[in-house]
Image: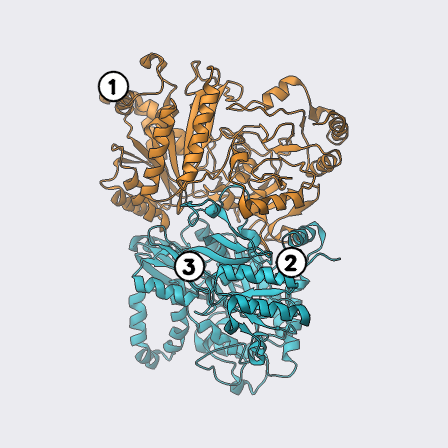
Chain colours: A cyan, B orange
Amino acid sequence: MGSLHGGTALLEWTEVVGSGNVITDEASLHAAETGTFATQQRIPAIVRPGSREEVQACMRIANRCSVAVYPISSGKNWGYGSRVPASDGCVLMDLGRMNRILDFSEELAYVTVEPGVTQAQLYAFLQERGSGLCMDATGASPGCSLIGNTVERGFGHTPYGDHFAHSCGLEVVLPGGDVIETGFGRFSGAHTAPTYRWGVGPTLDGLFSQSNLGIVTRMTIWLMPAPEYFQAYYFRCEQSDGLAGLIDSLRPLRLNGTIRSASHIANDYKVISALQQYPWQETGGQTPLTPEHMVRFRRELKIGHWNGSGALYGTKRQVQEARRLLRQALKGKAQRLQFMDDRMLQLAGRFAKPYQMVSGWNLERTLAVLKPVYGLMRGIPTDHPLESTYWRKRTPIPTNMDPDRDGCGLLWCSPVAPNDGKHAERLTTMASALVLSHGFEPAISLTVITDRSLACIISIAYDRSQEGEDGRAMACYRELLEKATSLGYPSYRLSVASMSEMEQSGTYGALLSTLKQTLDPVAVLSPGRYIASLSK
Amino acid sequence: MGSLHGGTALLEWTEVVGSGNVITDEASLHAAETGTFATQQRIPAIVRPGSREEVQACMRIANRCSVAVYPISSGKNWGYGSRVPASDGCVLMDLGRMNRILDFSEELAYVTVEPGVTQAQLYAFLQERGSGLCMDATGASPGCSLIGNTVERGFGHTPYGDHFAHSCGLEVVLPGGDVIETGFGRFSGAHTAPTYRWGVGPTLDGLFSQSNLGIVTRMTIWLMPAPEYFQAYYFRCEQSDGLAGLIDSLRPLRLNGTIRSASHIANDYKVISALQQYPWQETGGQTPLTPEHMVRFRRELKIGHWNGSGALYGTKRQVQEARRLLRQALKGKAQRLQFMDDRMLQLAGRFAKPYQMVSGWNLERTLAVLKPVYGLMRGIPTDHPLESTYWRKRTPIPTNMDPDRDGCGLLWCSPVAPNDGKHAERLTTMASALVLSHGFEPAISLTVITDRSLACIISIAYDRSQEGEDGRAMACYRELLEKATSLGYPSYRLSVASMSEMEQSGTYGALLSTLKQTLDPVAVLSPGRYIASLSK
């Protein structure tokens, strides 16, 4: 931020949002500049508008003063950059104060929210009302913004797992400060603004997701009716080469609507890192985990090379029939297909101790993992998955987790593959070998994010306080992203460290840059975020 | 078309597409200028490119010569304008020659097509292969283009009824002649181009639907696995005020996934006009049909004020359970809930004659309607719904139907309402009274196009050869469109007669115009189609 104009902007913003909402103290700025991997971007100030009108006013000031701003909703963009802007010198616009739930319909099953509304807040809202609806939750922690996650096209595990596909009716502040509503919202009094996605004429929602073309200040999110009966299923596959068989036998059930949820397959590394921290003691400090360690862990924890979970929603009879079809499909492909409902979960909790005495299996440890996954499949937010960001830390996991503050290293690479066994096999084999060769554990999950696609999340978890690890992890991430893309599996989402490297050449890149140039001629909104500026 | 530049363009286009594909004879032009309602737009020529490269070359010529072109796929945009451009003087670009099926996957259930590929062609393709997949079909006739209907966001009746929601991977020729691919298609060799909709970075598909920002020259369309078992259901409601109850009792079943198809409720006028032409004899030529006529018709044809249909897809047990839930939901709301599968349909056909002798009910006539609807719910294209465009004609329906040629008057108004009884009631009550007051029969259907929305199609069918009817029908249409919008039910789609009247003011209209101006500075692509040009 050029000091002259920047100073003017700060003064003007202060007039708009109040001095308490323009933050320039070193500690706060430093915290906001810190993510779960190395970044160089500096943040000169944080501005916290409290309403859409204030966002508009702030953008007009930004344009007048040529100061770039970078909006975040909750900033819980773990593994992709947390609160850190894509370019250096952006003022952080924190939308967390805009946390109103503006509209809700029990009958039509939707809620309309501002960017500061978190998963926990919506969950509490529904509980308080005794609503018969549930939300989809990501594992990204209860404090994660609904809008933030949805515009980034994040996902969860229920039938509404593809968040962006279950949203509509965006209110967007354009870079210049004007405001529009997408879909039917632009027609005053339209009853279908929160129910029908496309509106009439071109549909603009997509322009404002994963982009820097506007600030989403309101969104309608669709909710699911809670099922009459819910049953989760878990299975494992003992064969390291069994993944393709699993994927191919589950696909028909997803395509024909028998499995409606975004089911999930995790490799052994992923499950272990969800259950505990790195076994520094047993390994004598050696990294990464060796094949021999893995054999022992799989045996001890009763997990497979691949470990699946998902859920069935419906009447008792619908679930019963789905269970029959699932059993049939997984026969010979998976071992230990188990089903769990509320009653069983309660019982298992009660009898974990005696069970362990008889079987030697630490059911409590397994339940500790199953329960949050079980909850996620019912749309209950949890911060349990956040624990795995402490995987390589040598200090215990604190109660009040904050991966940014605690030097947890985390890079998420998220290539998409067709929902097809051979592709899943090819991608995960490459990723495992590559991540191991860089000295990290390849924790991999595959989520059936849509009928035809798998979101493959490869976590590179490390300890930022270890000398050189930041650099080694980033090198691993970059090689992985490039290799996956060149094999035909580009990622559904990018980190602030990789946005500038995304293929932006050719007519597509030119089109994006032209749109950017047209809507944001002064380049004040999130420069470098998914869209490169026109090369001059 | 300015004659000088226009002439140059024609010469240059001829070099690109060959003289046989530049059409300027009066008869052809006149036919293309003729839709199912009055239009004034003249078409100076028709150009028929045979490939994407030819489309690009044609657009470059159009820009150089400042000549506007208006692309159509099959031009079967019945009720909304057929082949007639939104503005006067556009050269028609007929993409019908581009009719290749470019890619197909039985496992991942998709097909990639060019704009000339028709519903009938895809259906035959799947049949020939003995594919286990089905398509969704609209009632708009077998010759209707898949891409044309999808970019207009048309719909059918299966679980894939919302066509645009089940497509991805667009190849688009921009107004200037450059070409882009949406989604992951821009990454060379991406396996997920046909399977994952959003890609990475902003999602642009929506920009190119219902717009004039690009020409879609390729699209992937997702296909459904044929169900193990299929059962259609039909019901009727004898109470004129029973609609709200029907809608509200079906909604939960749609929201919870029990009913996955786009089920359909038609009023008595709609069913009658599907079964026969206007009863000129019985009414002594009087229009519109009186309440007394309607009482008699409903009795004779065994139909209700409201008549529903839908289908259940799954294993026998899944369908059985859905049937139980449907029965429960419709209890006291609907009469004569009946189920039909392949075997029953065969039997009914065989015994229609004896059945009539016993019961007096002309089952054959009912079957004549049920069968095409039954087929549509299995994704089998039909031209049966086209017969209703001859409703008010005094001549019999020809074998080779062509509503444009035959002077069939048809205007479709298509407001969307929330999937909620009181809204459905309010909208249809208004529409019925308004259409009747203009002297036409209000043939209305409501389709549960998404979980939360009803597409309400109100047909104004008339005889263009009757003096003054064109004007009276258009007045009715305009009043209806305006009234529906002002009540809060804007339409999901517009006719070429109404695009220019759509609300384009305010920041939203300005944004659209800016996008148009940026992507098509010479305004050569479909001027006036959904997006107004910048006022100068």
Q: Quadrant of residue B83?
A: top right
- In this rendering, the answer to whether A380 lies above or below A302 is above
The answer for which chain carries disc 2 is A
* Amino acid type, label 1: Met
Callout 1: 10 Å neighbours few (<14), some, many (20+)?
few
Q: Quadrant of residue B82?
A: top right
* Tag shown at residue A531: 2
Residue in the foreground of this view, choosing between A353 and B176: B176
Report the residue marked by disc 3. Answer: A158
SS class, disc 3 = loop
The answer for which chain carries disc 1 is B
Of tags 1 and 3, the one toward the viewer is 3
Could you tell me how far apart the alpha carbons at marks 2 and 3 are, in whole angstroms? 31 Å
* Tag shown at residue B357: 1
Q: Are marks 2 and 3 on the same chain?
A: yes
- Quarter containing the N terminus of chain B: top right
